[in-house]
Image (cartoon, rainbow, N blue to C red):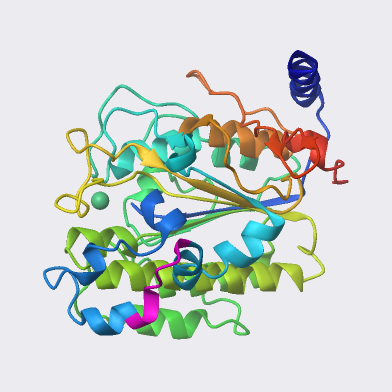
């Protein structure tokens, strides 16, 4: 029986690779920098949330984010993840079930991480987190060069280095990062207001406030209706480096609320409704211990451990994946192009798309490959 199922899965895989019909019409990739799988799947950490070194008001944080029951606790922190995504989408990366998502790059910091996500390639060459233009071709550029998606790809990031990782030049797709100003040509938008706020921020860092990045992206989505969008949020990582576990939880909760708002917008806009898929992930993990949770990198164990959530057409409603499995961050680029019915290629090797495991339900086994679960969406 087991081998029969394996053969079925294998056939499904071959079917996946050979078919070219898109599984979805639009894709939004949303990342929150350096957010650990531990908090995604288990909610607030029992030790860190009580540690006055990392939390200014432990009793108030406990009231907001603590519950002895792990399911209730993670839902308190990330209500959209554990209501809508858990019911309609899928969540991968709970290592308590050996369901692993990892970065494939050696360095486990942001530049190599975003490079891996968008180029499908774990580059051995080390580029630190600096404004150095990336020479590797990425899937967003590739899609923007295809007739179907030309001029319909855009990226917004809190971190001001991301435009360099995406190889931004004057002729490529719109990429807005850090406190870069927005286009004010269309007077119907709130861009003038966002720009005024940006100009008046006194203490600017390399990472723009996520709320401003979110509003900038949302304004663009409403005006331009991009088919492929990247929204890169950054404050979870900032708070963690500042050893502020309270801020880290608050920012994660805010990201969850942004996702809820964006998904609601998508599902109530005729252009996007029922034909838009969200891929939500992070660029790296962090230290797994209570003494090094704040940091990450080559020497910090746990930094390569990540997670992924997906929601929308092309994604089976399998909820939290609980089977043994290994997904790599470098598979995202090909997954994005595959789901849109395109085949991303570059001058470097590109990892294969993700194929989701079969999940055992109460009375039957369902092969959870993306293609099997959902019929193709017309372009
Ligand atoms: Zn960091």
On screen, residue 186 above or below 319: below
Residue at 70% x, 38% y is 360
In the rendered structure, the answer to whether residue 48 lies left or right of residue 379 reads left
Q: In the rendered structure, does residue 228 fall within the stretch colored magenta?
A: no
Looking at the picture, tell me which residue is in the foreground, 222 or 56. 56
Q: In the rendered structure, does residue 64 fall within the stretch colored magenta?
A: yes
Say if residue 28 shows up in the picture. Answer: yes
Residue 171 percent location from the top left of the image: 52, 46
Q: Quadrant of residue 234?
A: bottom left
Residue at 70% x, 45% y is 149
Residue at 17% x, 34% y is 299
Residue 268 percent location from the top left of the image: 76, 74
Quadrant of image for the N terminus: top right
Residue at 27% x, 47% y is 286
On screen, residue 88 above or below 13: below
In the rendered structure, the answer to whether residue 6 lies left or right of residue 208 reads right
Say if residue 209 shows up in the picture. Answer: no
Residue 335 percent location from the top left of the image: 63, 35
Looking at the picture, tell me which residue is in the foreground, 162 or 305. 305
Looking at the picture, tell me which residue is in the foreground, 125 or 8. 8
Among all residues in the image, which is located at the extreme left? Answer: 53
Residue 326 percent location from the top left of the image: 51, 29
Write the start and end of the magenta stretch as one range. 63-70
Q: Quadrant of residue 178?
A: bottom left
């Amino acid at each position: 029986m087991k081998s029969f199922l394996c053969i079925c899965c294998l056939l499904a895989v071959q079917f996946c690779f050979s078919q070219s019909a898109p599984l979805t019409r639009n894709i939004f990739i949303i990342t929150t920098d350096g957010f650990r799988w531990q908090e995604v799947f288990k909610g607030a950490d029992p030790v860190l949330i009580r540690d006055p070194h990392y939390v200014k008001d432990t009793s108030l944080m406990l009231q907001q984010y603590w519950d002895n029951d792990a399911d209730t606790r993670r839902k308190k922190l990330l209500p959209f993840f554990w209501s809508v995504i858990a019911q309609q989408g899928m969540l991968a990366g709970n290592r308590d079930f050996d369901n692993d998502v990892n970065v494939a790059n050696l360095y486990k910091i942001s530049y190599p991480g975003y490079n891996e996500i968008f180029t499908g390639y774990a580059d051995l060459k080390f580029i630190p987190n600096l404004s150095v233009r990336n020479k590797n071709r990425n899937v967003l550029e590739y899609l923007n060069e295809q007739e179907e998606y030309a001029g319909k790809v855009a990226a917004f990031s809190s971190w001001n280095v991301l435009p360099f990782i995406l190889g931004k030049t004057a002729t490529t797709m719109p990429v807005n990062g850090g406190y870069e100003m927005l286009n004010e040509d269309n007077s119907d938008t709130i861009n003038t207001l966002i720009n005024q706020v940006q100009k008046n921020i006194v203490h600017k860092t390399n990472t723009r406030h996520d709320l401003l990045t979110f509003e900038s992206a949302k304004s663009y989505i409403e005006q331009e209706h991009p088919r492929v969008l990247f929204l890169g949020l950054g404050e979870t990582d900032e708070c963690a480096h500042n050893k502020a576990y309270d801020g880290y939880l608050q920012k994660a909760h805010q990201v969850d609320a942004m996702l809820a708002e964006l998904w609601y917008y998508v599902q109530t806009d005729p252009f996007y409704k029922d034909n838009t898929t969200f891929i939500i992930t992070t660029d790296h993990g962090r230290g797994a211990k209570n003494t090094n949770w704040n940091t990450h990198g080559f020497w910090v164990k746990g930094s390569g451990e990540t997670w992924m959530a997906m929601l929308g057409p092309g994604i089976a409603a399998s909820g939290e994946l609980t089977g043994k499995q290994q997904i790599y961050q470098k598979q995202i680029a090909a997954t994005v192009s595959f789901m849109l019915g395109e085949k991303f290629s570059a001058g470097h090797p590109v990892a294969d798309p993700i194929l989701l495991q079969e999940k055992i339900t109460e009375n039957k086994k369902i092969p959870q490959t993306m293609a099997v679960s959902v019929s193709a969406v017309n372009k």
